[in-house]
Amino acid sequence: MSERAGRGQSHVVGVALLLCVSVIALGVVAAGVGSVVGETAANANAMRVADTLADAFAPTGPTGHESVRVPASAGRLRTAARDVRVLDANGTVRRYRTNAVIFETGERGVTSVAGAIVVRDHGWARVTRPVRATATSDALVLDVVVVDGELDVSGRGPGIRIRTNATGTRDALAGGTYRLAVETSTPEAFARYYERHASGGRVLGERDYDGDGVSSVVIGFPPAARAYVLTHDVEVAV
């Protein structure tokens, strides 16, 4: 073989190797872009679900019958039993049995409990809306959402359609110092929220009141001359 022919073959091999490297690199880039797009779409979907649950289970939401479409083409929407307690210096003065409404898709999720909204993402959780409370020296007003009924349905097509029927009640309490205990699987998220937003109350700790393995985060409020619990009772069904 001549020297010129050898150089020609080397050139062809070199070009072929460069083309292979380029194709592989483009494949890696495409996979990376696809992963980013997929993560962005999944996060956007979770936030749309959070907005929908925030509206459907808001303490100031509409009363009567409503039909709600949860925009989830994938994932699971279910309920889980939870308790909300109002406590004074002597112990529990009111106990509300409610259900958390939970949406899960992969490692992401959204939970509505007692009117609060918690968003979870890859093992990390944050409260995007707390339990609504208005605390002054004159009056303490707690707005608690109580959900009755069970859900366990998977996302499909344009989303999950659920039905709600909401009513409201008002419960007056004597003046004094009160605490609110909300049973939740993410008490640390509430603790972080109230560290940043101390005006809405102060986390005093956690306690498993009924021994079921799910702790309640305990939120304390300053003394008030009067106290009210406004419950927004929502029945849910598919």
Image (cartoon, rainbow, N blue to C red):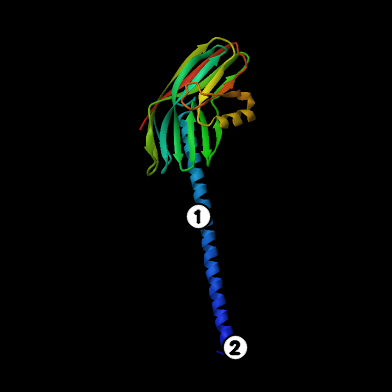
Residue 64 in view here: no
- Identify the disc placed on residue 3: 2
Give how far across and how far down residue 85 sits, in percent.
50, 19
Classify mark 1: residues with Cα within 10 Å, few (<14), some (14-19) or many (20+).
few
Q: Is residue 120 left or right of residue 200?
A: left
Q: Amino acid at mark 1?
A: Gly
- Identify the disc placed on residue 206: none
Which numbered disc, 2 or 1, marks the residue that appears first in the sequence?
A: 2
Q: Is residue 76 left or right of residue 129?
A: left
* Vertical side of 25 occupied by 164: above or below: above
Q: Residue at x 48, y 33 (%)?
A: 111
- Identify the disc placed on residue 34: 1
Q: Residue at x 53, y 51 (%)?
A: 36
- Quadrant (top left/top right/bottom left/bottom right) for the N terminus: bottom right
Give how far across and how far down residue 48 sits, in percent.
48, 39
Give how far across and how far down residue 2 sits, in percent.
57, 90
Q: Secondary structure at mark 2?
A: helix
Give how far across and how far down residue 237 sits, in percent.
36, 30
Are the residues at dot 2 and dot 1 in contact (C-beta closer than 8 Å)? no
Q: Secondary structure at mark 1?
A: helix
Classify mark 2: residues with Cα within 10 Å, few (<14), some (14-19) or many (20+).
few
Q: Residue at x 59, y 11 (%)?
A: 176
* Vertical side of 25 occupied by 165: above or below: above
Numbered marks: total: 2
Q: Amino acid at mark 2?
A: Glu
Residue 104 in view here: yes
- Quadrant (top left/top right/bottom left/bottom right) for the C terminus: top left
